[in-house]
Image (tube, rainbow, N blue to C red):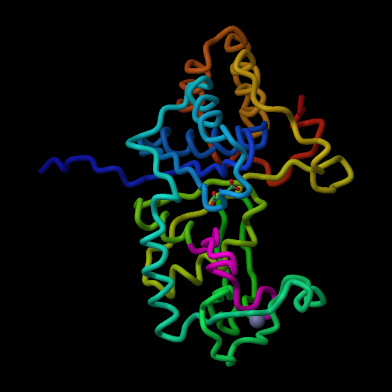
């Protein structure tokens, strides 16, 4: 009666190639990697290259090289979202033909006074899809979930978000749609990512519900904030991850995640640091917030 152990955990790291990896992305990669490997789970890498105009030339290769030199090993072939357009188009067409999504021709200027909450101008306009954004209708409902670090998070989709874009006017697919379809397609059970995406999660829960997809567990790692509580500005952005600092930056990232790596690891290889992390990972140690001095940016 021995069951073949099947992975009940599939995690992922999903970088956007708009730039290099920096310390914040390392903390996210490390957390998702350790959370997966510490339970014998799979860990995938997915390149979120949905927006070619914002892609930095060479960034994809640089991201993979950085992950490798920091000792990360992923399972299977890396998936690129640029190879998944047919899947996104299928779902988009289905939502549109069912009337669950509609075309919006509002200009940026027209929407400016509404601070990102779409007022529904095009809801019943019946525009064609040509040269229009596609929005999905949201219900007047609050969506909520329990994040493993941040606790309960609630958002009223109608009042706080409004019908949101799933395909942009320039024809590019929106992150919200692609991420939900890919996480389901890849069988992701656990999403570990930065808390900047916390307020995207209710939109993703709604799309999962609408499309009959399973809901993964969520763990949003803290954003690094300044001592006064303000979000880290661009000027604080740390430089690209240097290859020769892999061990020390991994140790720093572990500390930012609430762990206390032993002093002997100072001279260890990146792989040894990761192995220590796998053996000692405890997600309950992750702090909800992180201020600059603790996070010790370079
Ligand atoms: N591609 C997104 C980013 O780099 C992360 C998406 C996700 O983890 O859901 O911010
Ligand atoms: Zn509109």
Q: Nearer the viewer, residue 176 or 205?
A: 176
Which residue appears at 57% of the width and 72% of the height? 143
Using residue 12 as the reference point, say whether residue 119 is left or right of it: right
Residue 100 sits above or below residue 204 on the image: below
Q: Where does the magenta region start and end?
A: 159-177
Q: Where is residue 44 in the image (x, y as percent from the top left)?
A: 41, 40
Residue 142 sits above or below residue 168 on the image: below
Using residue 15 as the reference point, say whether residue 209 is left or right of it: left
Is residue 166 within the magenta segment? yes
Location of the C terminus by quadrant is top right
Residue that extends furthest to the front in the rendered view of this protein: 130
Q: Where is residue 43 in the image (x, y as percent from the top left)?
A: 40, 38
Residue that extends furthest to the left in the rendered view of this protein: 1
Q: Position of residue 157 (x, y in %)?
A: 62, 76
Location of the N terminus by quadrant is top left
- Find residue 18 and report its image quarter: top right
Q: Where is residue 268 in the image (x, y as percent from the top left)?
A: 54, 10
């Amino acid at each position: 009666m021995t069951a073949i152990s099947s992975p009940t955990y599939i995690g992922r790291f999903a970088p956007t190639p708009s730039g290099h990896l920096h310390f914040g992305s390392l903390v996210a990669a490390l957390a998702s990697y350790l959370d997966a490997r510490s339970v014998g789970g799979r860990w995938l890498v997915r390149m979120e290259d949905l927006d070619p105009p914002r892609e930095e030339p060479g960034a994809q290769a640089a991201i993979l090289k950085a992950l490798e030199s920091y000792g990360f090993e992923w399972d299977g072939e890396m998936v690129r979202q640029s190879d998944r357009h047919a899947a996104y188009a299928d779902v988009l067409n289905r939502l549109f033909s069912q009337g669950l999504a509609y075309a919006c021709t509002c200009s940026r200027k027209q929407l400016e006074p509404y601070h990102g909450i779409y007022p529904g101008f095009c809801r019943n306009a019946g525009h064609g899809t040509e040269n229009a954004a596609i929005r999905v209708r949201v219900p007047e409902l609050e969506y909520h979930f329990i994040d493993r670090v941040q606790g309960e998070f609630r958002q009223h989709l109608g009042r706080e978000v409004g019908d949101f874009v799933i395909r942009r006017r320039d024809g590019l697919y929106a992150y919200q749609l692609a991420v939900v379809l890919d996480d389901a397609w890849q069988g992701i059970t656990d999403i570990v990512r930065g808390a900047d995406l916390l307020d995207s999660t209710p939109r993703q829960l709604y799309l999962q519900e609408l499309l009959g997809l399973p809901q993964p567990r969520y763990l949003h790692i803290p954003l690094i904030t300044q001592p006064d509580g303000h979000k880290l500005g661009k000027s604080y952005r740390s430089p690209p991850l240097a290859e020769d600092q892999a061990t020390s930056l991994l140790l720093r990232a572990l500390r930012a995640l609430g762990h206390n790596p032993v002093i002997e690891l100072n001279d260890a290889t990146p792989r040894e640091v990761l192995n220590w992390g796998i053996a000692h990972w405890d997600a309950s140690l992750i702090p909800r917030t992180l201020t600059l001095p603790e996070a010790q940016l370079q």
